[in-house]
Image: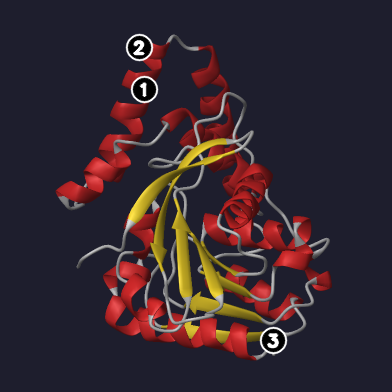
């Protein structure tokens, strides 16, 4: 499946990042596609660009630490990802947009509304949640990621490279196509580990009830990564919301694209049209 044009852009004071662009119809609303943890714009959205581009202008960046995203010197923060996305819109002269966030990207989309409310005309939240750790086991799991993040910052670069390659790249690359493995090999794995810790600590329940823009929630009902009931909390908490269900797992955006993409398009159209 051919990918749309991509380019590197320099964001003042933030760094260089990579974006995919689809021009869309004249005067089309902009979708800002925000990929999930350990993915890239291409890995997450390759099956979606063509259909979404028939109705919207589409911008899909690599988020910081992922693929060709910004390489920062400080720790990874989801808030920085949200500010990066707003800066990309500034760079491209886009005033308002609809963030479309998948998994980790859904946390960034929520933070985009909170931090740049005047820019966000709607939200599309996919296979994501207002929080990702609740049980003791989950908290311990994310503490493990946090410990790895701390270790990585104290480890000489050669040992760090070995750690990330052996533990993470090998595990994540099982069963993936060669091009996908090549994409993942471009990650800054220190920031990937830190991103896992940041996701574990994310919780928007205190302010999610204030979301006042049209919101679509795409729920993957067979998801074993983000449990169904946790996705459903978004539907229960946000006021102006509509749920769209896909009977598939967390990787449905590409593994079940024939079913997922039409529903994603419907969700995006709902967020756009309800806002008029």
- Asked which quadrant contains residue 158, the reply is top left
Residue 35 visible in the current orientation: no
Side of 159 relative to 115 (left or right): left
Residue 226 image point, x, y percent: 51, 63
The residue closer to the viewer here, 4 or 75, is 4
Place of residue 212 in the rendered image (x, y in percent of width and height, measured from the top left): 79, 77
Check disc 1 and report its element: helix, strand or loop.
helix
Please tell me which residue is depicted at 66% across the width and 54% down the height of the picture: 134
For the residue pair 194 and 113, the one nearer the viewer reads as: 113
- Precedes in sequence: disc 3 or disc 1: 1
Disc 1 and disc 2 in contact, CB within 8 angstroms: no
The answer to whether any part of residue 49 appears in the image is yes
CA gap between label 3 and label 2 equals 51 Å
Q: Earlier in the sequence, mark 1 or mark 2?
A: 2
- Residue bearing the label numbered 3: 275
The residue to which callout 2 is attached is 158
**Picture quadrant of residue 232:** bottom right
Residue at (62%, 26%) from the top-left corner?
74
Residue 20: x percent and y percent?
39, 57
- To which residue does mark 1 refer? 163
Image disc number at residue 175: none
Q: Secondary structure at mark 3?
A: loop
* Category of crowding for the residue at label 2, using alpha-carbon neighbours closer than 10 angstroms: few (below 14), some (14–19), many (at least 20): few
In front: 44, or 246?
A: 44
Q: Is residue 17 above or below residue 144?
A: below
For the residues labelled 1 and 2, the Cα–Cα distance comes to: 9 Å
Does 82 sit left or right of 52 as displayed? right
Horizontally, is 125 left or right of 181 in the view? right
Residues marked 3 and 1 touching at CB (< 8 Å): no
């Amino acid at each position: 499946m051919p990918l749309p044009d991509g380019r590197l852009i320099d964001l003042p004071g933030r760094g260089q990042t990579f974006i995919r662009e689809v021009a869309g119809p004249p005067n089309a609303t902009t979708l800002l596609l925000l990929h999930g943890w350990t993915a890239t714009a291409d890995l997450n959205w390759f099956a979606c660009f063509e259909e979404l581009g028939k109705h919207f202008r589409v911008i899909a960046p690599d988020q910081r630490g992922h693929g060709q995203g910004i390489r920062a010197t400080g720790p990874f923060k989801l808030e920085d990802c949200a500010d990066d996305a707003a800066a990309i819109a500034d760079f491209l002269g886009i005033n308002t947009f609809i963030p479309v966030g998948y998994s980790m990207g859904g946390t960034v989309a929520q933070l985009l509304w909170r931090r740049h409310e005047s820019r966000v005309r709607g939200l599309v939240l996919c296979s994501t949640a207002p929080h990702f750790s609740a049980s003791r086991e989950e908290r311990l799991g994310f503490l493990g990621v946090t410990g790895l993040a701390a270790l990585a910052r104290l480890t000489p670069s050669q040992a760090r490279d070995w750690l990330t390659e052996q533990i993470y790249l090998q595990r994540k690359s099982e069963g993936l196509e060669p091009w996908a493995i090549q994409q993942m090999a471009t990650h800054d794995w220190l920031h990937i580990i830190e991103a896992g810790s940041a996701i574990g600590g994310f919780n928007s329940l205190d302010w999610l009830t204030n979301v006042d823009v049209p919101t679509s929630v795409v729920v993957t009902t067979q998801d074993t990564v983000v449990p169904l009931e946790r996705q459903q909390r978004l539907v229960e908490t946000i006021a102006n919301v509509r749920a769209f269900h896909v009977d598939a797992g967390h990787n449905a955006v590409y593994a079940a694209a024939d079913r997922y993409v039409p529903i994603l398009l419907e969700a995006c159209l709902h967020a756009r049209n309800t806002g008029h």
